Image (spheres, rainbow, N blue to C red):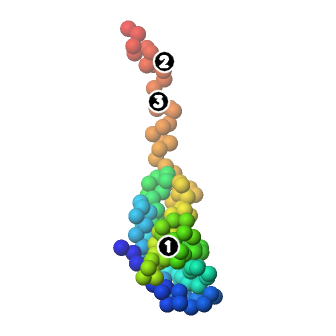
Amino acid sequence: MPNFSFNISELLKKPEGESFEVGLNQKIDLESEVKAKTPFAGSATFIRIDEGIEVQVSGKITLIVPCGRCGKDFETAMKISFSKTFWENPKLAAEPTEIISPKGEIELFPYIRAEILVQIPIKPLCSKLCQSIQPKIESPLKKPSPFDILKGRIK
Ligand SMILES: [Zn+2]
């Protein structure tokens, strides 16, 4: 279980504009065929705003991604940076994960995971020169001609 939950109850007692920063260096399970090779390393800054907390997250990670053409796993490094607002008043939240818990906790995991996964191309390639084995199998020269099939049926 990745631990990206933070207690910001002290910050909630402070006036708007107050903030603190924490370093991040956590293992992350992306719950996907994409695996993390390194921990997620970066920082999170928590800023007191009216009725909530704004969190600014930035960091980097190296992933192991299956190639969309040949299927071979390869490594790719990426950086992410985003901000997210969490609310004390549930009515201001667009989704339940945006609500600050009664204990003053917020969970960043779903947002960090989503930011990482959205950056992965739909068909990632292990290299620009990646040659799939597929075209050889689908070579038109090896396909039987429809006329040969007909000849075989007419006797
Ligand atoms: Zn490939």
Q: Earlier in the sequence, mark 1 or mark 2?
A: 1
Amino acid under label 3?
A: Lys
Q: Position of residue 142 (x, y in %)?
A: 46, 32
Question: Furthest residue to the left?
Answer: 1
Q: Is residue 129 above or below residue 112?
A: above
Q: For the residues carrying marks 1 and 3, which lies nearer the camera in this image?
A: 1
Closer to the camera, 79 or 76?
Answer: 79
Residue identified by numbered label 3: 143
Amino acid under label 2?
A: Phe
Question: Furthest residue to the top?
Answer: 155
Residue identified by numbered label 2: 147
Q: Is residue 71 left or right of residue 93?
A: left
The Cα atoms of the two marked residues, 1 and 2, are separated by: 68 Å
> Is any atom of residue 28 visible in this view?
yes
Image disc number at residue 99: 1
Q: Which quadrant of the rendered structure holds the C terminus?
A: top left
Residue found at x 48% / y 57%: 67
Q: Secondary structure at mark 3?
A: loop
Q: Position of residue 38 (x, y in %)?
A: 44, 75
> Is any atom of residue 62 visible in this view?
no
Residue found at x 61% / y 82%: 49
Q: Secondary structure at mark 2?
A: helix
Q: Earlier in the sequence, mark 1 or mark 3?
A: 1
Q: Which quadrant of the rendered structure holds the N terminus?
A: bottom left
The Cα atoms of the two marked residues, 2 and 3, are separated by: 12 Å
Residue found at x 40% / y 64%: 31
Q: Is mark 1 within 8 Å of ligand 1?
A: no
Q: Position of residue 154 (x, y in %)?
A: 41, 10
Residue found at x 43% / y 67%: 30
Closer to the camera, 54 or 143?
Answer: 54
Q: Secondary structure at mark 1?
A: loop
